[in-house]
Amino acid sequence: MNLPLGDSRHHGRICRVRPVHIFRSRFRRGIGYNRGHGADSAAPIELMRGRMPLSIPLPAHAKVIINGAVIENSGGANITLTVHNKANILRDKDVITQAEADTPAKEIYHSIQNAYLFEANKDEWMAIARALLEQFQRIRPNSAPITTHILELLAEDKLYNALRASRRLIGFESEPPPAPTPPPPPAPLPAVKRSELDEIREQMALLQRRIAELDPG
């Protein structure tokens, strides 16, 4: 039986198969996945938007976490996953393990990451994230705009956005702290009044001049 292009049959069911040339074009342009690891990279893959399915290019032997389940492309070819309903998704390259969370900002990212991926322990990890954020802000007061924004996102239960914002905190942490503000210059000393001894000396000099005027010889 002839099948339409892009379809295949597996145990009596029709499965969608994306043509290879379309995948390669999307893969080269970096559509649907994060190409970087820096603070400005879009760390996780966002939740489903509206009713549009989410396509995830997955290279060979790469992994992705979907609602806490680790899915690996164990084959030798690149594939594309299509998610049709709401899910929390994170690529393995964007996951920070407990061993890798070796700085305060990475510990914050790790706690928000776990709250995002594991619904059963969400409240516990969010409480840890809030405590770490408040501690980070006390140590680095100039981080307040970022930490306050993350705390607001956590309060609104926007964990995906909070996870992205915590990437900025990792980049912020790598920057040297600002130089301390120099102390203000000391206040000028008040004008010193002439001492009584100076006044006596002036009076004696004046008296000597008068005596000299009266007796020029």
Image: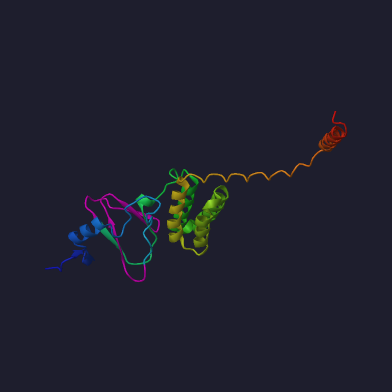
Q: Which residues are magenta?
A: 49-78
Question: Extreme bottom residue here?
Answer: 51
* Residue 130, picture quadrant: bottom right
* Residue 19, picture quadrant: bottom left
In screen coordinates, is 172 left or right of 205? left
Image quarter where the N terminus lies is bottom left
Of residues 96 and 145, the one drawn nearer to the viewer in this rendering = 145
User: Could you say where residue 148 lies in the image, as x and y percent from the top left?
Assistant: 53, 58
Of residues 1 and 208, the one drawn nearer to the viewer in this rendering = 208
Look at the picture and state if 22 lies above or below 134.
Answer: below
Asked whether residue 1 is in view, the answer is no
Image quarter where the C terminus lies is top right
* Residue 3, picture quadrant: bottom left
Residue 158 lies in the magenta stretch: no
Count all numbered tags in the image, as a single digit. 0
Of residues 204 and 84, the one drawn nearer to the viewer in this rendering = 204
User: Could you say where residue 99 lies in the image, as x and y percent from the top left?
Assistant: 44, 43
In screen coordinates, is 177 left or right of 35? right
